[in-house]
Amino acid sequence: DIPSYAVAQDNTWTGFCVLTLGIGINEERYAEKFPDIPAPKTWDDLLNPAYKGEIVLTNPVASSTAYLFVQNQLQRLGWDDGWNYLLTLAPLVGQFPDSGSAPAKLIGTGEYSLGVSYIHALAKYRAEGFKVKMIAPPKTVGDVDCISIMKNTKNLKSAQKFVDFILSTEAQELMSSIDFTIPVNPNAKGAEGSIPVSTLDLIDYDVKKASEQKDEVLKKWTEEVK
């Protein structure tokens, strides 16, 4: 029952959970700073000049999470419009931490009103009592965590049993209850507070293109984002 997007065409890997990017909002700080501005619902809403200094975004040179966001915009809008978006957003960002987990924490603790983060990380902070709201904007990007058996493994039967376990309803529901990731197994229910993959509007993300462009994109980012 594993959906096709979570299975490699050459069968070298199988996905077990989906990670997707979204917008995190600290509800208390946002209400204090922007009482007359509706909360953003789309990526383009983040370009409001009023948000200057109140957005946290990870540094894409150091973080794969932020590089995924950069590629999200380049593939969503096209090369030229994507860079226009990124270079318009960058001056509004108050901090570019190196850690992919930092934005969710900084939003949760109220140091920033807004940020870009994996939705499951935001959901975890919300479940712990922080005043965090998650937005899954249209045309966002998802990444699939996956599992493989190494070629020539000495423990093939054990490896196969472990893969079967990871792909099971039981394991994926357990995983979601711990880290709020979205299960791939359609029979598994995500943790309360997580966002089902069926409700997400995802772009057709080209992993190969993202990989081939990485050096060029990060060079341009380093040169143009101050």
Image (cartoon, helix red, strand yellow):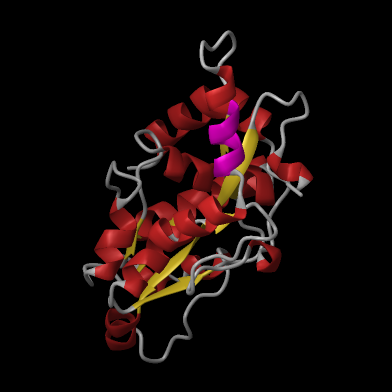
Which residues make up the magenta segment? Answer: 160-166
Foreground residue among 168 and 90: 168
User: What secondary structure predominates along the stretch shown in magenta?
Assistant: helix
Asked whether residue 115 appears in the rendered view, the answer is no
Percent position of residue 17, x then y: 57, 49
Percent position of residue 5, x then y: 73, 43
Q: Residue furthest front?
A: 157
Q: Residue at x 46, y 54 (%)?
A: 175
Q: Residue at x 41, y 39 (%)?
A: 60
Residue 180 counted in the magenta span = no
Direction from residue 92 to residue 217 in the image, left or right? right
In the displayed structure, 222 sits above or below 59; it is above
Percent position of residue 211, x then y: 58, 27
Asked whether residue 128 appears in the rendered view, the answer is yes
Residue 165 counted in the magenta span = yes
Foreground residue among 169 and 106: 169
Q: Residue at x 30, y 67 (%)?
A: 107
Q: Residue at x 53, y 34 (%)?
A: 162
Direction from residue 29 to residue 190 in the image, left or right? right
Percent position of residue 49, x then y: 41, 70
The quadrant where residue 169 appears = bottom right
In the displayed structure, 149 sits above or below 78; it is above
In the displayed structure, 99 sits above or below 220; it is below
The quadrant where residue 189 appears = bottom right
Q: Quadrant of the C terminus?
A: top left
